[in-house]
Amino acid sequence: MKYLIWSILAVPVAILFGQSQTGDEILQKVDRNMFSENKIIVSRMVIHGERGSRTVEVKSWQRGVKEAFSEFLAPAREQGTKMLKLQDMLWTFTPSTDRTILISGHMLRQSMMGSDLSYEDMMEDPHLPNLYAASVAGEESVNGRSCLILLLIAKKEDIVYNSRKVWVDKTRFVLVREELYAKSGKLLKRMDVREVMEVQKRWMAKSIFYKDVLKDGEGTEFLVDSLVLDAVIPDYLFSKAALKK
Amino acid sequence: MNWFLLKGLLRDRSRSLFPVIIVAAGVTLTVFLHAWLAGALSSMIQTTAHYKTGHVGVMTRTYAEKTDQIPNDLALLGVDTLLAALRKEYPDLRWTPRITFGGLLDIPDDMGETKEQVPVSGMGVDLLSANSPEWNILNIGPALVQGQLPKRRGEILIAEGLAGKLHIHPGQTATLISSTMYGSMTFVNFTFAGTVRFGVGPMDRSAIIADLSDVQAAMDMTDGAGMILGFFRDDLYHEDLADQLTARFNARYTNASAKFSPIMGTLRQQSGLSDYLDLVRFISNAIMGIFLAAMSIVLWNAGLTGSLRRYGEIGLRLALGEDKGHVYRSMIVESLMIGIAGSLIGTMIGAAFAYYLQVHGFDIGSMMKNGSLMITDIIRAKVEPLTLVVGFLPGVLATLFGSAISGIGIYKRQTSQLFKELEA
């Protein structure tokens, strides 16, 4: 009798908190909330290194998952540096050299400006459901918000982070915490969303703390100053000619 | 008696020539091998000091823990002040700051697009000061192959091998891609002033040398350096002095709780070179030990052979009434003469060969094409006082022991059996 009562109670609770949905369905909802075909972001990275902190300000234009253009606005040393990412190629332009230089593929996985983010982390906005198979691994409260824990396993071999553990806000479908793992199972990076914001009726991260666990330093704060979703971005921006303009 | 024995040895070549040749050959090889190994080790220490560690080096505590990673994010700052203090407090050494870095060298085509991109290992050294010690330490002037030495900022020297691979010539511009001490990517244009060949494999394959101030600007390391290197003025590594100096400096300047406080390390202590040098010394001593043991056995055997060959002569001498002890002593004195003569000849020949290789050297560049060891392509032998003794003593002693042991047989001869043996 006791088990029957518990079972009757458990069904609506499970439905209410999304347990009835599969991991893939939840991930689709996260993607629908967070992914935008075109976006323009002005952000700041506060990099807490071993010798103090410094701030890098960047404006980025992203189209789809493979095209991105970034311009560094500050500090003065980096101001005017531009980067163009098309597929797996990254070109960089620096005003001091007046040259556009192609950065080799493996460099995309290197630390960007000494931060805890790689160039790929910064310039890519992947469709997670296309890359990972998700399963629900549990529930947890994060910063007072009720979250589902999803375990994402890469569907392909050549994906940088072979698996991810993500904490999804149950009602806003925004990622609030993430752990990125290598194929060996080693934890590579940790991400904590400290503040979210509502943009064009979607919930997006406003302040994220990144920590590359393989790197010395105190982590990197990624702060979004402005975000425009579904923005109109001219085609010429995703050409090498735009780098020198 | 000695003169009599010497005349006997000289007149009867069958008693002296073969043993002397054996002793001389063994001593020659011992002397030569010792000088060669001493030269190779000395060359490795000098090259490592000049291009990598200095005889002593000052860096931050955290940099010292990861020197092999060249962690410029942990570099020394406030170098000018520290350098002035070092020059004042330790005037017996020449002090010079350096930044070692890695990166990519990007060669543009006519349109400014990337034509070639190769990994390089760079050094930022004081090239432009009038009294910079680097010209002598790195031997930059004689190493110049093409072009000219840098005269102004923005000019670099590039390894001849690297220049050949990239098909670039003095006057051309290239961009260095590296990272600042804060981890940002940095791009800097440089002009090739000239090409250099140091005769050190790893340097000649991928080195670029720029002025320290240019590298400081490129790496965002104002008043910074990876290390401040110290060199004894006679350019020899004095281990005891280096240890004392290091202990004194660290007691005064190093703060165990501050990650970026300066710490001094000797050449041996840096990058596990201590273990490496110990290993090299152990191997060279082991080779010498094995070689000496083998030579002693050969010479001992030669003594035995000599005694056997002279079995009849010894029997006759005993039969004529010569005292066994006298016969034994005379053989010992003979072996001593042979040992001294052979060792003298061997030492002279070995030292002459070694001296030839000290002057001319032996080019091992083709064998070290892809090696990462900081060792010159031309290895030179090193003739030092020990070289003249190292073969002499075992040469004499081995012959002596050989005769002493084989001569014991004299005391086992029975006088009653002597005539029978002679008749046979």
Image: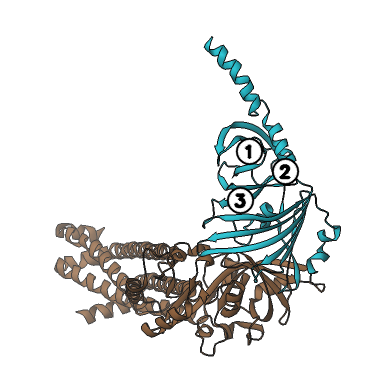
User: Relative to B392, is B94 above or below?
Assistant: below
Label 2 sits on residue: A202
Q: Which chain is brown?
A: B
Q: How far apart are the alpha carbons under marks 2 and 3?
A: 17 Å
The single residue placed furthest to the right in the displayed view is A235
Nearer-N-terminus badge (2/3)? 2
Chain A, chosen colour in render: cyan
Q: Earlier in the sequence, mark 2 or mark 1?
A: 1
Residue position for label 3: A208
Q: Which residue appears at 23% of the width and 82% of the height? A: B3
Of the two numbered discs 2 and 3 in the rendering, the one whose residue sits closer to the viewer = 2
Position of the C terminus of chain B, as image quadrant, is: bottom left
Chain containing mark 1: A
Q: Where does the image place residue B167, in percent across and percent down from the top left?
A: 74, 74
Q: Mark 1 or mark 3: which comes first in sequence?
A: 1
Number of residues whose C-alpha sits closer than 10 Å to that of mark 3, classed few (under 14), some (14–19) or many (20 or more): many
Could you say which quadrant of the image residue B260 lies in? bottom left
Q: Which residue is mark 1?
A: A168
Q: CA distance from mark 2 to mark 1?
A: 14 Å
Q: Quick one: SS at disc 2?
A: strand
Q: Is residue B116 left or right of residue B21?
A: right
- B417 horizontally vs A74: left or right: left
